[in-house]
Amino acid sequence: DITDSEPTPIKVREGALDPKAHYERERGGEKELLHMVVVGHVDAGKSTLMGHLLYALGQVNKRLMHKYEQEMLLDAPGHRDFIPNMICGASRADVALLVVDATRGEFETGFESGGQTREHALLVRSLGVSQLAVAVNKMDNVGWSQDRFSEVVSKLGTFLRQAGFRDGDITFVPCSGLAGQNLALPPTEEALLKWYSGPCLLDVIDNFKTPPRPVSKPFRMSVNDIFKGTGSGFCVSGRVETGILQAGEKVLVQPQGELALVKGITMDEMPTQVTFAGDHPCVTLSGIDMQNVLVGYILSDPANPLAVTSRITARIVVFNIKVPITRGYPVVFHHQSLLEPAVVTKLIAQLNKSTGEVVKNNPRCLVKNSNATVEIETAHPICVELYRDVKELGRFMLRSGGLTIAAGLVTKIH
Ligand code: GDP
């Protein structure tokens, strides 16, 4: 399982501050951010449930809700055609909430072939999500039956374990999005209280482990936007994927390979001396032409630069595509903010979706919903990392004709 394999050891810069201690000193005690994707079969009740949960939390104004919807951060529509959109949220997700409909017949429809319950669960697992909350929803439709809950838990649990989720990382919660039962507060429904004394859904979400901020790894920041600032130099905004950056340091602009000086850093429009993995800062650069920095580029630690490559091997999950992927298939390689023309140059192996084992070497084509190992060549050099080293820079998507056709994890850089 490549999501569990050992990372490459990191070279530590001599004389550098201990990054973890630095982070603790600056940010210790702050709430960590967690990205959750909501998945499940169409009509399982995802929107109703999330609407209720967010409303109950009292933290949602309309604008924010809209923003979440657009980014697909919180909701992944269950309709087949929307799977490609869901991936944008899923590829950034740390944890997932799987919503299933407990109604007799409905759970079965979503779970059996053609339903999205399995597909979504496999997809989020393939993208490295290991913690999962399962909302066994619409319990009001089955009279809050414990037997029905156990039946769903047993059927789904077997499947999820096969898909690579660990028992201790899956929590099943009986609830009703419509009746607002067992979401943000413990249940009040007598029929449910009779047999259930576990956590409500929000408790489960609250107890998800936040991913560690990779502050000890070499500095990398993906560039999302470039604009003229007020003073000299220009500003670059993006996300610090790994490491630490301090004002006054130099960064390497990759893949182009030029050095730039960090004149200043701002976070939420406030100047700051330092920025850490997980932050979204604006960095003012000088000593480099603004034209030489492009969206999709990566700023990195000059002493520990990224590999620059045009050829990678990757494990991909193919979506519900109409035309199978064959050797020589042209795609757009979408990595962070980068869009780069590329070609699938080799179909190395087709893999079992649950176990990752090779089903067939050198397949002639990859059909919808399959998993595979492929080789990809990009038109220009790119900067990626192995997924096992830096998740954020080791994932990508493949697009074709305006649709996302596959999501992938980098397993080898040539
Ligand atoms: P989505 O497609 O997964 O986002 O599902 P929706 O939230 O749109 O819900 C689909 C349908 O199920 C709607 O008609 C809802 O009113 C209904 N529904 C959602 N949650 C519940 C529930 O807890 N109990 C019952 N009985 N119906 C529900």
Image (cartoon, grey):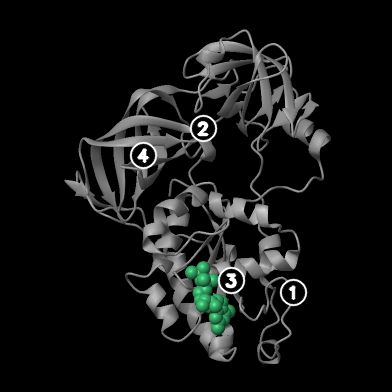
Ligand 1 closer than 8 Å to label 3 CB? yes
Residue highlighted by disc 2: 8
- Of residue 92 and residue 227, the one placed in the foreground of this image is 227
Asked if the residue under mark 4 is in contact with the one under mark 3, i.e. CB atoms within 8 Å, the reply is no
Q: CA distance from mark 4 to mark 2?
A: 17 Å
Is any part of residue 1 visible from this angle? yes
Label 3 to label 1, Cα distance in Å? 16 Å
Type of residue at label 4?
Answer: Ala
Mark 1 or 2, closer to the camera: 1
The answer to whether 161 is drawn above or below residue 65 in the figure is below
Q: Say which label, 1 or 4, has the lower sequence index.
A: 1
Tell me the residue at 20%/38% (across/down). 327
**Residue 414 image position (x, y, % from top left):** 35, 26
**Which corner quadrant of the image does residue 259 belong to?**
top right
Left or right of 52 on screen, residue 160: left
**Circles 3 and 1: CB distance less than 8 Å?**
no
Looking at this rendering, what residue extends furthest in the left direction?
364
The tag earlier along the polypeptide, 4 or 2, is 2
Residue marked by disc 4 = 314
Q: Earlier in the sequence, mark 3 or mark 4?
A: 3
Task: Please give the residue where the numbered disc 3 appears in the rendered image.
Answer: 48
Q: Which residue is mark 1?
A: 185
- Quadrant of residue 17 in the image? top right
